[in-house]
Amino acid sequence: MNSRLAAETRGRRSETLAAWALRLKGYRILGRRLKTPLGEIDMVALPPFGPVCFVEVKARTSHEAAMLSVGRGQRTRIARAAHLYLPGRPDLQGRGARFDIIAVAPGRWPRHHADAWRADDL
């Protein structure tokens, strides 16, 4: 299997594991791999209470490496894509938005970092 296909497979598995972790916390998954003209959003989830969560899923050798791999440029792209997504969902208006990261490491349960960054901090 070539490395690009292996990375794609690892990414899909990590996103599935992350979705299950959120479901167990009571979140409802609204979408996965949503494409906008400004980029892709890994996952959009709705917690039982609070804002709409735009979730970036990162699989690395450790949770720490996964967290560090989401740089400023990627955060900006995700925030812009989220601002394109929300106007198309009037049912979500007024709930606000939050940006989360789920770090996935081999042999470990995914670690959810809620409110990992704010769009106005970019």
Image (tube, grey):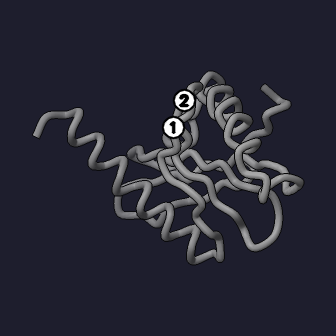
Crowd band around label 2 with a 10 angstrom C-alpha radius: few (<14), some (14–19), many (20+): some
Crowd band around label 1 with a 10 angstrom C-alpha radius: few (<14), some (14–19), many (20+): few
Residue under circle 2? 39
Q: How many marks?
A: 2
Name the kind of residue labelled 2 in the image: Gly
Q: Quadrant of residue 38?
A: top right
Q: Looking at the picture, does residue 115 appear above or below residue 81? A: below
The one of 115 and 16 positioned closer to us in this rendering:
16
Q: Looking at the picture, does residue 122 appear above or below residue 58? A: above
Give SS at disc 1.
strand
Q: Quadrant of the C terminus?
A: top right
- Report the residue at 69% width, 63% height from top: 46
Residue 35: image tag: 1
- Report the residue at 66% width, 54% height from top: 113
Q: Position of residue 7 (x, y in %)?
A: 28, 40
Q: Position of residue 63 (x, y in %)?
A: 51, 50
C-alpha gap between disc 1 and disc 2: 6 Å
Q: Quadrant of residue 56?
A: top right
The one of 85 and 51 positioned closer to us in this rendering:
85
Asked if the residue under mark 2 is in contact with the one under mark 1, i.e. CB atoms within 8 Å, the reply is yes
Residue 102: image tag: none
Name the kind of residue labelled 1 in the image: Lys
